[in-house]
Amino acid sequence: MEDKEIVKLGILETLELIKSQTITSEYLTRLYLSQIEKYNYKNALLEVFDDAITRAKEIDEKIKSGQKVGKLAGLCFVIKDNMLYKGKKATCASKFLENFVSPYTATAVQKLLDEDAVIIGRANMDEFAMGGSNENSAYGNCKNAFSDEHVSGGSSGGSAVAVACNMCVASLGSDTGGSVRQPSSFNGVCGVKPTYGRISRFGIVAFASSLEQVGPITKNVKDNAYLLEILAGFDIHDQTTRREEVPNYLDSMSNGVKGMKLCYCKQLIEKYKDSKYYSKFYDVINFFVENGATVDEIDIKNIELALPTYYIIATAEATSNLGRFDGVKYTTRTCSSSDIKKLYVESRTAGFGDEVKRRIMLGNYVLSSGYFDAYYNKAKKVQQYISNSLNKVFDDYDAMIMPVAYGEAFKIGEKSKDPVSMYLEDMFTVIANIAGVPAMSVPYGFGVNNLPLGLQILTKNLCESKMYTIANFVEENYKGGMHD
Amino acid sequence: MTNSNYDIVIGLEIHAELNTKTKVFCGCQNKFGQEPNSNCCPVCVGMPGALPVLNKEALKLAIKAGLACDCKINDYAVFERKNYFYPDLSKAYQISQLVKPICIGGFIELESGKKIRLNRIHLEEDAGKLTHQLNDTHIDYNRGGVPLIECVTEPDISSADEALEFLQKLRNRFIFADIAHCKMEQGGMRCDVNLSIKPKGSTVFGTRTEMKNLNSFKSVAHAIEYEAKRQIEEIEKGNKIIQETRKWDDDSGISSSMRSKEDSQDYRYFPDPDLLTIEVEPSVVESIRSNMPLLQEQRIQIYSEEYNLPTSDINILVNSKLVSDYFDNAVKLLNEPKEIANWIITELLKQDVSEKMPISEQKFTQIINLSLTKKITRSNAKILLENIIQTNADVMETAKQLEMLGDISKEDIESIVINLISENEKAVADYEKTPDKVVQFFIGNVMKQTKGRANAAMARDIIIAKLQNK
């Protein structure tokens, strides 16, 4: 097989090459390194780890000597820059953590390492995962894999572009309001936000703790299912992880959608009807019906409140989570004053970007006395309402479908001056975070600008297998799936 | 207070560090006096990505504290984040409880019969410690994450004396129930005072101030007296009391304003999304209740009513939980409470018992029993006790080695006395002049030869009989 074909392969196929000793992990790692050299002008990776080759050699040694190796032996992964990997920098694409070296390893990253993966670098993102275009990175934006004029999406833009540009076999992102699914949609890859609590958050720099999950970004659906099984599970370091047994997602995927009951939400799709992308969505509904599924239109009143609810809860938690970045322990201290308040103000003014500051102020506002009940408490009630509504839907339906975003990747700079239009981008994705249910983006063709589009599939809590079944069927059978 | 035209209204907030092995949200040791920053991990220094995991032992102790103060234990409780910036607070928020604390209500009854009601007891984490030096400030995060309970009273206290009595009783309950060591000098117990005054009999509360930095019971009392006097003087002058936080300075004996209500922090409390709602099973509460050690008041009652100990002895025994526990254990081994109390007070409390008792209850009661059953004499028992305290050796072995065991018969004593008389003509001659001194001289020698085993009374009778027969 030619080198340029090897880097396009997914996890399962590449693993075969490694295990059969057709290629070594070192060889594979070098292939990705040359891909990175060629494509990282897009700014997907903030750092390529210099010990990747050494680690690949160690795993090759293990394979050669016939030792038992892990389920990701010798494969190369990229992690988002908000994930701790001991001894490596984790900056969250912020100036604040410019020099922060991880003192321990995140559980999700450790699970990759335990299966003998090679972690090749850390991926660009919106600062502290706040944003949907990667334009909020303190280290420059990341360009779309398909177009240098368009955004990669965000916040896990670098993670998605790294997979799409074959700089790695798969990557990890984190999804607080769509940060895995939206860039996956924009770059034609598969991105999953699992059920809340399925993957440990230990060692992931927190943005909005009650909403976020680590999510795998892969080249195909089966890879994603395979990777999620490795990442998921109870973690003694994270009380919010779920104790339910992790299924073998690959084996529990079934064939086809025949007999499945699918639905879409009237209130959400109505707003989409004028869109030039609506016909794409309409086509895929027909596709499901042709293949034996039913697709019903259902009512969920006030579901559009998910968006303001999301921005209240997320900013409230972010305000608190980011308080520790006060200039005492992190960032270069520029303030020479002995006045502690001045140290805080100067450090935070210099260290955070505009979007982070905006959200910190919003969060403080919604938590402050006199406003707490009107905003935070009300948002928690609406969250409960939306969560209950969705659970009720999933009593009757196998899955809910909707677009991931309004359309294709937008142009760099197009929305960065207008935060509200940027926030509106998250309408379809925040629902799964607010309700805690699993959701994924699977590529289903291209838009008017010939950039990828993702279909979003939501299922009941812990029913990722069903989500993968549907996504896999789309991937394998829907015309206008992935480009070559 | 001297001015009888006013009522003083006091509420207290007491923090106590819990006796757990590890910190409240991580596995670091809960230990005082370590090398600065040597007892920390990513969780308790608030590293990015670190998450708290609740220490169940801390939760149990908080429930126990509630039970010790007759609180109601809530069937669920929620941790919230109290957000504020301070360099000793590594995450810029403290994990605490606001809306749903673990314990609510409760009371402590003073000797007068007055009940001081509690509003709540909740569980939270301690912050680190700042040390200010001439040109810089050092932060030690060892204390960060140590489990604390905060106990808030209703404004039921009306004098410094009542405040002190309440604090003593609360402290004793925490100590006797193994909840907290309450060593104020180590910061193991801290107290803030809320105080206001009102015209005598009025039902309307005055404006209150809060006083912080009270490092001993003495400073609590001083601060209350000072603040009540200050407020009365202000009112008498026609001034208004400003709602503010005041800092007590122990050395100068005065308090000064730290910040007014306008500058007070908005803590922006909200439920901590990293921690689950605590669900308290009734069975857990019951098991804590049934394993509750006896509190000081309960012990006083038993010592007095069941053991008939004099009040002075009881006060000594219950002054320290260590001594009281030791006494209780010893009585379980040897049902002679009076004798054991005497031995503890006269013999063991000579030693340093601040950290531990000098001898095990088993050995201690074994020695007392040897004396009570007259296997050895009382004075030998004391020598034996001192010996065992030094060596921690086996009691019977040591008694044998010291030749304390074995009876000395009347015949044996008679033959020793006969010998002594024949060997000490001068003493015999002095008997007429100084009989007591001579008898004492012979008793001493009999004891010496028998290694103290002889019955002294018996020896005395024999000696007098022989001397008079001369």
Image: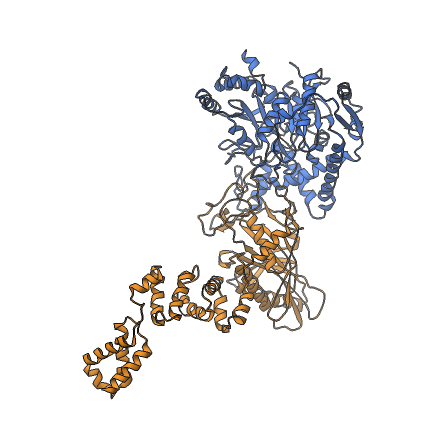
Chain colours: A blue, B orange
* Residue A59 % position (x, y): 47, 23
In this view, the residue in front, A89 or B294, is: B294
Residue A126 higher or lower than B328, as above or below: above
Give the mark count.
0
Query: Residue A272's spot in the image, x, y percent?
Result: 78, 25
B307 or B78: nearer the eye?
B307
Find residue B153 and report its image quarter. bottom right
Q: Quadrant of residue B52?
A: top right
Residue nearest the viewer, comparing B16 with B202: B16
Question: Where residue B191 sits: x, y (%)?
Answer: 57, 59
**B139 relative to A430 in the view: left or right:** left
Left or right of residue B379: residue A235:
right
Vertical side of B309 occupied by A102: above or below: above
| B335 vs A175, nearest the viewer | B335
For residue B239, above or below residue B26: below
Q: Please tell me which residue is depicted at 52% across the width and 46% down the height of the picture.
A: A338
Tell me the quadrant of the picture where the C terminus of chain B can be found. bottom left
Residue B73 appears at what percent x and percent y? Answer: 64, 54
Look at the image and tell me whether residue A37 can be seen.
no
Quarter placement of the N terminus of chain B:
bottom right
In-image side of A468 versus B465 (left or right): right
| Residue that appears at 69% across and 48% down | A369
In the rendered image, the residue lying farthest to the top is A2
User: Image height check: is A117 above or below B421?
Assistant: above
Is residue A298 shown to the viewer in this render? yes
Residue at 68% over, 39% down:
A313
